[in-house]
Amino acid sequence: MVLYVTRGTDGSLCGREHCLVTKATIQGLSFVVLVIGVTAAFLWLLLPYYGAILWAVILAILFDPLRRRLEARLGGCRNLAAALSVLACICIVVIPGAAILASLAQEAASLYNRINTREFDLATLLGEIQGALPPFVEKAFATLNLGDFVEIRTRLTSFLMYASQEVATRALSIGQNTAQFFVSLGVMLYLLFFLFRDGRLLANLIRKASPLSGRHTDHILEKFSSVVAATVKGNIIIAAIQGGIGGIAFWMLGIQAALLWGVLMAFLSLLPAIGAALVWVPVAVYFLLAADYFRGVVLFAVGVLVISTVDNLLRPPLVGRGTRLPDYVVLISTVGGLSVIGMNGFVIGPLIAALFIAVWSLFSEEQLHS
């Protein structure tokens, strides 16, 4: 450090002031670097369980109204209200999710075995479709450089075998890694209890520790909570309903692997402008081309009148218009999140997009008023 001393009427006072300011600046910067370094190390330490922490926060936000009602009825007993809220999460989310996952793994493995042993002959099925199609469709495939039906049949067979095996492998790996699964589940439930009990205190601590202004911090925290609730309620619940309706329709029509197709429809329903129609429309078209008009018409009716209208009917009351992102933003952020992060990306992707829009809207307001 170089100290410049200027003499004035009071001697070397200016030099001492400069030294004190410089020392205070170095100490302040060092403390900021220390805070950033310790925070980064702590986040790195939590990284293996980020999924458990993420879902604990999501469930705490979603079930907070229930926790508030329980706390009011129990005379302000926060511990008992938090414990009952955790129990409700286990009964409503954890147990049904584990049961669906186990059934999905079993059904995916069964489908893979049927394809591998030729019990489910996809080549014959596609041959029947090819025979029922008019000639101009084959010409259209050739014009679009999609190959002939032999190539398409080979690709679809390989893809379906790979997809069913991948689903079965990933689902079964959770059961095989029992210790890791239960550790993550324990971390999630343990953290969830304290988020229920001390959530308001933690929110106040975040507000006090935030380097942003109070208005900016409150706006971002409110946006975070609303987007998490909107993403889960508006996407997961609606997707589960659409997938459930589609799976039940497939099961009643005697279509094999109905649960697997229902889960696939639910997954595709998370993506705006794509949806479950990518599954039920080709199946309905196949029934019509195969002269199975009853199943084709029923499946079309269920798809158009029920599955496709669920989103329009349920999204406004579940999500609300104030927290809704544009469909193209949801689509891009969801696909990007799934590609970069994995399954948790369908929540983290829209959340990052919403925070991006919120921060830039605040920045724009500040620029307009400056």
Image: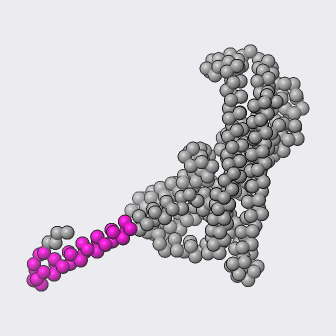
Q: Residue at x 47, y 69 (%)?
A: 210
Left/right placement of residue 29 relative to residue 150 reads left
Between 47 and 16, the one lying in front of the other is 47
The quadrant the C terminus occupies is bottom left
Q: Residue at x 68, y 48 (%)?
A: 173
Between 323 and 31, the one lying in front of the other is 31
Q: Residue at x 70, y 38 (%)?
A: 165
Asked if 17 appears above or below 218 in the picture, the reply is below
Q: Position of residue 310 (x, y in %)?
A: 76, 48
Left/right placement of residue 16 relative to residue 343 reads left
Q: Position of residue 96 (x, y in %)?
A: 77, 56
Q: Residue at x 58, y 59 (%)?
A: 49
Asked if 45 appears above or below 119 in the picture, the reply is below
In the image, the segment drawn in magenta is 5-34
Left/right placement of residue 135 relative to residue 346 reads right
Residue 191 image-quadrant placement: bottom right
Observer able to see residue 356:
yes
- Figure colour scheme: one colour
Asked if 251 appears above or below 158 in the picture, the reply is below
Magenta span dominant secondary structure: helix
Between 351 and 106, the one lying in front of the other is 106
Residue 348 image-quadrant placement: bottom right
Q: Position of residue 298 (x, y in %)?
A: 86, 36
Observer able to see residue 228:
no
